[in-house]
């Protein structure tokens, strides 16, 4: 199956094309290209590199959140438009699930962590037995940095870019996944989406929206104004 994966939720976006689970090509976009408009030439480039036409794509994988508001909107919008034009199926994958799958460690308590700003983190916990065999233990939530650090217990494993600011505060008995595995990669997103698709999961692209897990700063400001 031919999969196009769009990872735009993080500060270092990437796109990939895969034939079944085999990576055909991957392109790192950086921070500049995380808009729906600028994704178009990147998509043309990677499809040309793979020698695919747009209608050759059968499945579109996209990170659905949490993550950057702008990045998530761009990725989901691009996935919906591409699916509408080509007839491809869409599967959205939780961003922290992708982070956890990249860890490549066997753990009954694997925390995936992303910076949520405001001295907070997005966290989810998984049991990971290898490859893409992940079992969700604790669904995505936003917690204060200090509260999350207090939850850690001996034997826990941790991974994700949320550790950049917190690494020095981690207890010594916590297993920290290698830093090179923290950065989200579109290739892993594509493999997870394919596995979900093969198990019967689909995302209705008409109803698909990013999962921000919090209101935007503008929405919060608006709400505060209503309460005055």
Image (cartoon, grey):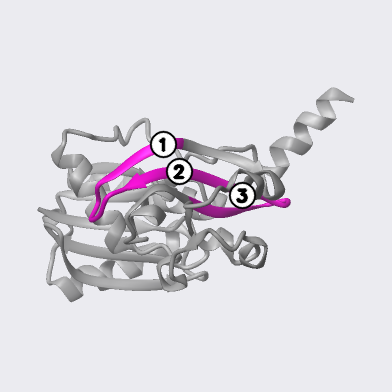
Q: Residue placed at 26% from the left, 50% from the top?
A: 192
Disc 1/disc 3 C-alpha distance (Å): 17 Å
Q: Return the disc, 1 or 3, that comes first in the chain's sequence.
A: 3
* Magenta span: 112-138
Q: Residue at x 38, y 58 (%)?
A: 7
Residue 115 within the magenta-colored segment of the rendering: yes
Q: CA distance from mark 3 to mark 2?
A: 13 Å
Q: Main secondary structure of the magenta part?
A: strand
Label disc, if present, on residue 137 of the rendered structure: 1
Residue ID for mark 3:
121
Q: Is residue 84 visible?
A: no
Depth check, front residue: 167 or 3: 167
Say which of marks 3 and 2 sits in front: 2
Q: Secondary structure at mark 1?
A: strand
**Residue appearing at x 15%, y 71% in the figure:** 50
Q: Quadrant of residue 168?
A: bottom right
Mark 1–mark 2 contact, CB under 8 Å? Answer: yes
Q: Position of residue 211 (x, y in %)?
A: 48, 39
Q: Crowding at label 1, few (<14), some or many (≥20) Cα neighbours within 10 Å?
A: some
Above or below, 221 against 46 in this view is above
Q: What whole-number distance in Å separates the C-alpha atoms at marks 1 and 2?
A: 5 Å
N-terminal-most mark, 1 or 2: 2
- The residue lying at 46 percent from left, 41 percent from top is 210
Q: Residue furthest top?
A: 227
Residue 73 screen position, x and y as percent: 48, 48
* Residue at the spot of label 2: 125
Image quarter hosting the C terminus: top right
Of tags 1 and 3, the one toward the viewer is 1
Count of labels shown?
A: 3
Quarter of the view holding residue 36: bottom left
């Amino acid at each position: 199956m031919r999969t196009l994966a769009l990872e735009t939720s993080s500060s270092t976006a990437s796109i990939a094309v895969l034939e079944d689970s085999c990576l055909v090509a991957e392109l790192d976009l950086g921070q500049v290209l995380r808009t729906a408009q600028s994704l178009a030439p990147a998509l043309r480039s990677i499809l040309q590199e793979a020698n695919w036409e747009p209608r050759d794509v059968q499945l579109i994988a996209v990170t659905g959140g949490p993550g950057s508001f702008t990045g998530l909107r761009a990725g989901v919008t691009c996935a919906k438009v591409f699916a509408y034009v080509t007839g491809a199926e869409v599967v959205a994958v939780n961003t922290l699930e992708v982070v956890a799958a990249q860890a490549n460690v066997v753990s009954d308590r694997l925390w995936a962590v992303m910076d949520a700003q405001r001295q907070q983190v997005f966290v989810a916990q998984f049991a990971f037995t290898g490859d893409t065999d992940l079992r969700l233990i604790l669904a995505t939530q936003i917690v204060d940095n200090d509260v999350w650090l207090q939850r850690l217990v001996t034997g826990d494993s941790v991974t994700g870019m949320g550790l950049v600011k917190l690494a020095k505060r981690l207890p010594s008995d916590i297993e920290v996944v290698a830093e090179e595995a923290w950065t989200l990669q579109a290739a892993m997103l594509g493999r997870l989406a394919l596995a979900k698709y093969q198990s019967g999961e689909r995302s209705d692209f008409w109803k698909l929206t990013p999962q921000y897990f919090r209101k935007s700063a503008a929405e919060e400001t608006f709400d505060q104004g209503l309460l005055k």
